[in-house]
Every structure is written in C-alpha cells, then in structure tokens.
Amino acid sequence: MTDPLRVVALGGGTGLSTLLRGLKRYANPLADPQVDITAIVTVTDDGGSSGRLRRDFDVLPPGDIRNCMVALSEDEALLATLFQYRFRAGRGLKGHSFGNLFLTALTDITGDFPDAVRKSAEVLNIAGNIFPSTAANVSIEAVLDDGTLVRGETRISRSRKRIRRIRLQPARVRPLREALDAIRAADLITLGPGSLFTSVIPNLLVSGIPAAIRESRALKAYFVNLMSQPGETTNFAASDHVRAIRQHAGGKKLLDYAVVSTSLISPALRLRYAEQNAAPVENDFAGIEALGVAVLKAKLLRKGPKVRHNSAALADVAVKLAIEGRIRRELRH
C-alpha cells in the first residue's frame, strides 16, 4: 500500500487520547501499513484548569487538545511529564497544568487557537494533525429525562439523571475547513471511546460535521464504551449509545460499525464500579443490528486495576477497518 491509510478520530477526554496513543505506532514512515492520523477534538470543557483559563482569557479549553498532543508526541514520556505537570502551589498557578498554560500563551501570541494548536504540533513533532471541532467559544447544555435543563459540561457530568438530549450554545457554530477536508478524504472515521454526551456527541452538533461524515466515502465506526457513566448513561445498552449518536446527528444513519469489547470484566472490578453506580455496558448485538449497524467484536480491555481500553487493541481494530475503508473507497471511485 503506497499511500498511508487516512484515519480521522473524533472525540475528547481520555478515550480519544487512548486510541491516538495506539495509532501513533502506525504513523511511523516505516510502519506497514502506515497511517495518517487526524484528531477532531471537542472543545466544550468548562471545568478545572481548562475552565479557569477559558473564563480568564476567553480561549477555547486546552485540556483535551493537550492530552491528544501528549498521546501523539514523538517522546511521550518526556512530553507527558512536562505537559501533564500540574502546579501544586502558587497564587493563580495552583491546579493549572503546564500544557494548558503553554497553549493559552501561544493562543495569545498567535491570536488564534487553531493556529496555536498547529504551531504546537510542529514544535513538538506530533505524529498527526489535531483540530478543535470548532473555533467558536461554545458550551453544551442538556435536557434531562425529567425535563430539567443543565448548562455546562461539568454540571452535566455531575448530574445523576439520564440525559434526553444535548445541544450547543450557541446552537450554530462552524467547523474548521481542515477538519471537513480530513473527513472528506478519510478511509476510516471513528467516534469514541469516551463520554457519550460530553466527549463524543458535541462534535456531531457542530454544523456541517454530520453531513460531511455521511457524504464521505470512508467507513464509519463507533467504539462503544466499556462501562456506563453514572447519570449520563445509566442502564444504557450498546444500542442506546448508537441510537443517541443517530438522534444527535440529525436522525439519519451515520455508522457502519459498532465496535464492542468481548473481554470479561472481573467480579471484583464490577463490584468496585457498582459502588460508584457504574456497570459494564450491555452488548445487545441484535439491538445494534436492528439499527442497521454491523457489530465488530474484539477483546479491548486493558489489564489493570481500572476498566480501561487497551490502546494497542483499539488501534489494531482501527487499522483493519481503515484497510476495509480504503478498499471501499477505491471500489466507489
């Protein structure tokens, strides 16, 4: 295969950076197959260091972008230590991460957050492209099952009631042209893993992104979460995740595949998460297929004291799907 496979990954939080970390080894020019990586990252975070910088400097939240940069950096060990370093003391500095301050400073110098991200990627030799889903200063609000309206990602994440719908404020914001170009040229477009309503779906609420995904000849896949999130997705089966994505993307089919993990989660881990009102997501294969989405099963659980995706396993699945997507693109050309 002469041209690199083109993978566009949409999401946010730790889920997206986990996938990118696995894909990075395929970005090496000597890799076979080689992958060209583009990350499109949600920018609705309003908590912690990102939220403070957003309020103080009127910049887009840098936290999720920072995590993606670390995941795709050439020397992740050194860069992770520096960019994830969090100040423990100092008036105004306590709680901030160095990476967030770096991106905020570069935004002030360049006058443009997407440009600051691009220049940071060049300086840090990032193995791929990273774009915010929009350059607009946008937030999210949720309508809960009882009709309550909750504003802001932090408050939504803390809510313990199921979410009926998420929307952006302001409602209509434009995506970056580079993001749309990457979607158009992709062999594979992925959503997730990550928080369904606060990391994955906000990208689909940016005007033009769902249409660009549908029009792209790429294969489209959603990595289903391993565990439910208290309130946000309590009692959500895998098909409920797929249905929510369709609903927020205009009610039309968006996905070709739902990738689900068949790894067994130990009783001890289940019990520990149950104390936090979280449980393994039920893989209702028939429910997913009834939505016109194919199921791809794989063992995706990382060994350890927490339920987390294995980045290498995620990347291996993504590459296989990208190869299938390339073949489909060439047949449709």
Image (tube, helix red, strand yellow):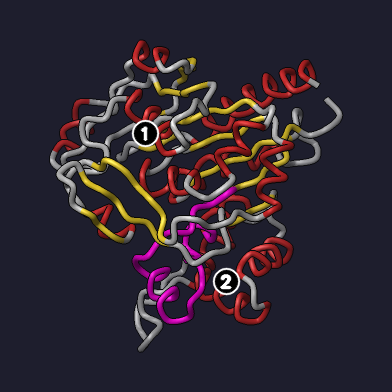
Residue matched to label 2: 103
Q: Residues within 10 Å of mark 1 (few under 14, many from 20)?
A: some
Name the amino acid type tagged 2.
Leu
In the picture, the disc for residue 11 is none
Helix, strand, or loop for circle 1? helix
Secondary structure under the numbered disc 2 in the rendered image: helix
What mark, if any, has residue 244 been given in the picture? 1
Q: What residue appears at the point 56 percent right and 25 percent down from the top-left corner?
A: 317
The residue sitting at 51% across, 73% down in the picture is 59
> Residue 70: percent from the left, percent from the top?
57, 56
- Left or right for 34, reference 77: right
Q: Quadrant of residue 231?
A: top left
Q: Residues within 10 Å of mark 2 (few under 14, many from 20)?
A: many
- x and y percentages locating residue 181 in the rendered image: 72, 45
2 and 1 marks in contact (CB < 8 Å): no
Q: Which of 61/243 is in front?
A: 243
State the image coordinates of residue 85 (x, y, percent, origin top left): 46, 69
Q: So how many labels did they put on this image?
A: 2
Of 147 and 31, the residue lying toward us:
147
- Does residue 3 sit above or below 164 in this rendering? above
Task: Please determine whether, in this image, residue 91 is positioned above or below residue 179.
Answer: below
Q: Quarter of the image holding residue 146?
A: top left
Could you tell which of marks 2 and 1 lies nearer the N-terminus? 2
In this view, 8 is above or below 207: above
Q: Where, quadrant-wise, is the N terminus in this rendering?
A: top right
Residue type at mark 1 is: Ala
Residue shown at 35% from the left, 23% from the top: 239
Which region is colored magenta? Answer: 40-66
Marks 2/1: CA–CA distance = 32 Å
Q: Residue 324 in magenta?
A: no
- Which of the two residues, 269 or 16, is positioned nearer the viewer here? 16
